[in-house]
Amino acid sequence: MAEKKLSFEEAMGRLEQIVAQLERGESTLEESLALFEEGTKLMKQCGTLLDKAEQKVNKLTSYTQGTQEPFAGEEN
């Protein structure tokens, strides 16, 4: 089953929950490892979303400075 892609805000919220749960220290080793693995995947997803947002900002900035057409040839 494919995992549902969360929005940036949802992923960050889940990461906060994971950190809080790990900091409490009440999880077993297996549970902690599973939480750490989930958190690592969420961090990667957030990083990808932030990179995409940065690319869009850079394109828009280039466009407003007259150096590039906005999203020319880009598919969403």
Image (cartoon, rainbow, N blue to C red):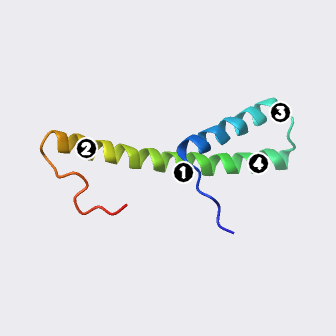
Numbered mark located on residue 33 in the image: 4
Mark 1 surroundings: few (<14), some (14-19) or many (≥20) residues within 10 A: some
Q: Residue at x 63, y 48 (%)?
A: 40
Amino acid type indicated by mark 2: Leu
Pointers 1 and 3 in contact (CB under 8 A)? no
Q: CA distance from mark 3 to mark 2?
A: 45 Å
Place residue 32 in its image quadrant: top right
Residue 54, horizontal then vertical, whole percent: 36, 43
Question: Which residue in the structure is indicated by mark 3?
Answer: 25
Question: Which residue in the structure is indicated by mark 1?
Answer: 45
Which one is in front in this view, the residue at disc 2 or the one at disc 1? 2
Q: CA distance from mark 1 to mark 3?
A: 25 Å
For marks 2 and 1, the one nearer the N-term is 1
Amino acid type indicated by mark 1: Gln
For marks 1 and 3, the one nearer the N-term is 3
- The secondary element bearing badge 4 is classed as helix
Question: Which residue in the structure is indicated by mark 2?
Answer: 60
Mark 2 surroundings: few (<14), some (14-19) or many (≥20) residues within 10 A: some
Mark 3 surroundings: few (<14), some (14-19) or many (≥20) residues within 10 A: few
Q: Residue at x 67, y 35 (%)?
A: 16
Which one is in front in this view, the residue at disc 3 or the one at disc 2? 2
Q: Along the horizontal axis of the image, is 11 left or right of 61?
A: right
For marks 2 and 4, the one nearer the N-term is 4
Q: Residue at x 71, y 37 (%)?
A: 17
Place residue 3 in its image quadrant: bottom right
| The one of 38 and 28 positioned closer to us in this rendering | 38
Q: CA distance from mark 2 to mark 1?
A: 23 Å
Q: Is residue 54 above or below residue 76?
A: above
Which one is in front in this view, the residue at disc 1 or the one at disc 3? 1
Q: Residue at x 69, y 51 (%)?
A: 37
- The secondary element bearing badge 2 is classed as helix
